[in-house]
Amino acid sequence: MANIAPVLIDAPKPPPRPYGIFDVALGPMPFPVPQVENYGLIYVPDDCVSDTFLYGIQCPPVSGSKTFSAIDTPVTGAPFVVIASYTCNVVGYTMDEAEQRVRTRMSLREQMAVERRIWQGQLGGGSVLGNIPGLFRGATSLGTASCPTEAVEMLEQALATNGVIGGMLHARWGMSAHLSNAHLVKEQGRLKTTTLGTPIAFGQGYDGTGPNGELPTTDDEYMYASGRVLIWQDTEVVVPPLPQTFQESTNTVFALAERAYAVAVECGTWAVKVTRNCTTAT
């Protein structure tokens, strides 16, 4: 019987973007002005100063003066670029098909890259372009939690103690199983929250390291709390014209997709080292 080659068909429709920081953060939003893409941004939030004061009403009238709080600390967001690439032999594929594939790859992977920027960053060297520090590096350590329940308590209390409005928790995807086992995760449509309603970003791009780069082990890893995370992005994914990246000697096209981003984290970050495999669901 003659060998018959399989028939080449169109790829099935790609899956939806996985759950992650794009479901929890404010954004992605368009850059407020074009210059942000090159120079970054800075603004003064209204939700970070936690000062609240009381005074009594009594006779005779109290003496003294009322206290005025300082303005919030400015928040900055440095620009960076997310890149997706695709290499293929043009035999059997058109330039349009190659461009669509690299755009699809970007749509599925850019969230993971932004999560990496937020948590651990990326060290320069080798083929990596530039040193990009993680926004969680240097977070305030709250110590060690013996179980996921204690970790959530410590992180949410840190948000409350510091008067953070709109705060959220961050953990690796695998921690979802442990938090769910402890009945700590609620679903509001696609959004996942704690029982108190604090949004939880389970990120595929998060690596579980500590604020000083401490690596996760077989028993423990880190979770974080933060103020609001705000994400801005270029409205367009840029794909250079593929004929310009075509290599005639090998009939190979090198497709590249790029999108510029900026991310800001308000009000601070806090970290807890949590033992995820405790023997009880507490």
Image (tube, rainbow, N blue to C red):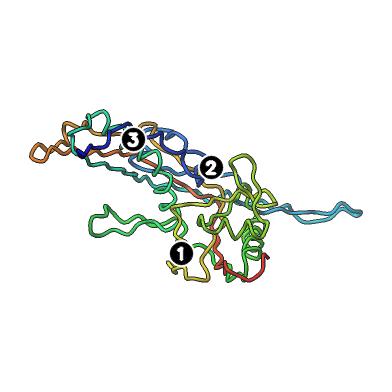
| Spot occupied by residue 146 in the image (x, y as percentages of width and height) | 62, 71
Q: Is residue 263 above or below residue 218?
A: above
Nearer to the camera, 151 or 40: 151
Label 1–label 3 contact, CB within 8 A: no
Q: Secondary structure at mark 1?
A: loop
Question: Residue reaching furthest left?
Answer: 249
- Residue at 49% x, 70% y is 218
Quadrant housing residue 125: bottom left
Question: How far is mark 1 from mark 3, CA to CA?
Answer: 30 Å
Find disc 3 in the rendering and name its residue: 103
Left or right of 124 in this view: 167: right
Residue visible at 53% across and 52% down in the picture? 202
Q: Is residue 245 above or below residue 228?
A: above
Distance CA(mark 1)–CA(mark 2): 22 Å
Left or right of 46 on screen, residue 260: left
Q: Position of residue 131 (x, y in %)?
A: 31, 56
Q: Earlier in the sequence, mark 2 or mark 3?
A: 2
Which residue is at 67% across, 65% downward? Answer: 281
Tag 2 secondary structure: helix
Tag of residue 23: 2
Rendering coords of residue 52 (x, y %):
71, 53
Instruction: Name the residue beneath numbered marker 1.
Output: 209
Name the amino acid, label 2.
Answer: Asp
